[in-house]
Amino acid sequence: MQFDANTFKRDFDAGSVFAYPTEAVFGLGCDPLNEQAVHRILELKQRPVEKGMILIAQSYAQIAPYVDVSDLDDVTQKAIKDSWPGPFTWLLPKSSKTPAFISGDSDMVAVRVTSHALVCEMCLAVNGPMVSTSANPATQEPARSEAEVLDYFGADVILIEGALGKQKTPSTIIHSKTMETIRS
């Protein structure tokens, strides 16, 4: 479907699961506070809840309630904010608002501020972040086209039409406490 902010917000609030283009691959997303919707994504992907999920947002303000950066030094906080918007996912200490079905078995939560225009519109429509995980079953390659999304999930997701960004690989993941690159 073509993106329409009102329809998207209605479906998001109702617990729908979406497939949508991101910077490099199609993602699956939903309301990060809707446990049933998150578990539906985990079921579709055949992914254990312990691994956790990424939250994607239009701005740092949208993810701020989910993180607690008070123990991170100023240099680290500046590095995080300077990397956004862009293809960097940070593992940040989670706040008490972050549900365990998002953070998995970790005291950290993966977050990214996107530069993808459509994803920004989606986050603005719901005034907050979305779950963002690659659109693929656990053992398959991430979908890079609408046709691949449909092959994987058919009518189990609402497909938001749009173009991928120019990035060739998924986002780099960095651990904020160790500054270790987890995925590049």
Image: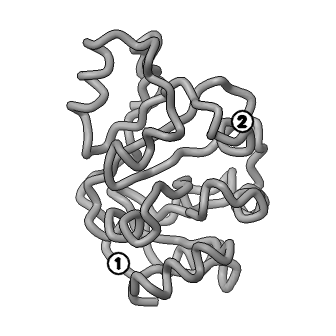
Q: Is residue 180 above or below residue 174?
A: above
Res 162 quadrant in image? bottom left
Q: Nearer the viewer, mark 1 or mark 2?
A: 2
Mark 1 residue type: Gly
Question: Would you name the residue on which mark 2 appears?
Answer: 104
Mark 2 residue type: Gly
Q: Are marks 1 and 2 in contact (CB under 8 Å)?
A: no
CA gap between label 1 and label 2 equals 30 Å
Residue 43 lies, in percent from the top left, at: 78, 60
Badge 2, how many Cα within 10 Å: few under 14, some, many 20+?
A: some
Q: Is residue 85 above or below residue 130?
A: above
Query: Is 123 on the left-hand or right-hand side of 77?
Result: right
Placement of the C terminus among the 4 image quadrants: top left
Query: Is 25 on the left-hand or right-hand side of 32?
Result: left
Labels 1 and 2: the sequence-earlier one: 2
Helix, strand or loop for disc 2:
loop
Badge 1, how many Cα within 10 Å: few under 14, some, many 20+?
A: some
Question: Would you name the residue on which mark 1 appears?
Answer: 162
Res 21 quadrant in image? bottom left
Q: Is residue 62 above or below residue 79?
A: below
In front of the other: 16 or 159: 16
- Residue drawn 70% across and 60% down? 34
Helix, strand or loop for disc 1:
loop
Scheme of image coloration: one colour
Residue 51 lies, in percent from the top left, at: 69, 37
- Residue drawn 66% across and 44% down? 102
Residue 11 lies, in percent from the top left, at: 59, 81
Q: Which mark is residue 96?
A: none
- Residue drawn 63% across and 71% down? 17
- Residue drawn 73% across and 38% down? 100
